[in-house]
Amino acid sequence: MNKVTISPKNYYGWAGYCLSNGEIEIGITPSIGGRIISLCYQQEELLYVDKNRLGETFELGVIDDLSTFKKNFGFRLWGGDKTWVAPEQSWVAGIPPLHLDAGQYTTQLDEKSITMTSPLDQETGLQITRKVTLQSGGEITLTQQFTNQSNKIILCGIWDVTQLLRPFRIYFPARKEQVKPDTRFAASLGNQHELLTTVAKDWVEIRCEKPLQFKYSFDIERGIAIALKEQADHFIAMIRYFKVNPKANYPQAGIVEVYNSDNYPYLELEVLSPSAELSHHDNIIHQQTWILKRFPKTMTIETILSSVVES
């Protein structure tokens, strides 16, 4: 077993922390929306970062005209893994709530974990806590919590968004006919036959390999998502486990979603919680377990998927 260490480290111009067990390095940057800005496995970086926005931080405070401010601020993507508030339709000016997405989070360090807490969000009345834990054996746990700090009732869901550096192939335990294409993007329907494939038994493969804008959502009955990156002589797999409730209402089109960018070399792997109605000081929690593994190229996709389910 490798020892887990936490140490200060600068990532792309942001002061942050390195959470590492020697084989896995997680880069945490509290000052830009409490992000996981770097995830390296065996020295291979898996996350995308926008090189045009390195080191950006903001002192937001109270904003007088939030809608105008957000429109001038624009929809910015710094990269990494972040927590958004779902549904997207509730965002003022169609931009993520700024104090949560771009605010400076406070930090608490433990032996194997880093907990980040957002400022109180002016737009939603929510406060986010993100706790990242790394075990010596390599298991990563991401625990996300929303707390309603306002006096109004809030209907929302937790929306974890990970920007992965292409190319990747994404796998969900679903059938091809269960896919929900996002028709805002023409390729979702027009290129579906080449982007989506049925593999193994009741698994769907989504190819995120080219600069093409599309998005797909799925309702799944087993909480598993796999991102597979092909290397010269092996595959790197990011495997995620999480609870799902097929009978619950979810705040977006699906329990899991994949978005692929045309302008930047990233895709988004998105995992959502059920919707919750939060009164004053109520909270909602969602947890994921991430496993990073290396598989030889001699293994078939079917064998890899089978081993992931059995583990």
Image (cartoon, rainbow, N blue to C red):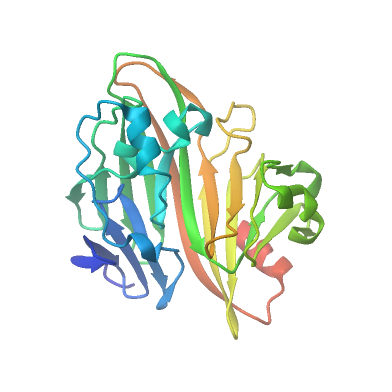
Question: 42 and 192: which one is in front?
Answer: 192
Q: Is residue 101 above or below residue 147?
A: below
Question: 221 and 93: which one is in front?
Answer: 93
Q: Is residue 93 above or below residue 303?
A: above
Where residue 287 appears, as percent x and y from the top left, is: 43, 43
Asked whether residue 97 appears in the rendered view, the answer is: no
Q: Is residue 274 left or right of residue 121?
A: right
Q: Residue at x 36, y 31 (%)?
A: 68
Q: Is residue 302 above or below residue 235?
A: above
Q: Residue at x 67, y 39 (%)?
A: 219
Q: Is residue 140 left or right of residue 305?
A: left
Q: Quadrant of the C terminus?
A: bottom right
Where residue 174 appears, as percent x and y from the top left, is: 72, 48
Name of the residue lying farthest toward the bottom: 233
Where residue 256 appears, as percent x and y from the top left, is: 59, 44
Q: Residue at x 32, y 29 (%)?
A: 66
Where residue 56 appears, as percent x and y from the top left, is: 27, 55
Query: To which quarter of the image does residue 21 belong?
Result: bottom left
Asked whether residue 92 appears in the rendered view, the answer is: yes
Q: Quadrant of the N terminus?
A: bottom left
Q: Is residue 150 left or right of residue 255?
A: left
Question: 118 and 189: which one is in front?
Answer: 189
Q: Residue at x 26, y 43 (%)?
A: 103
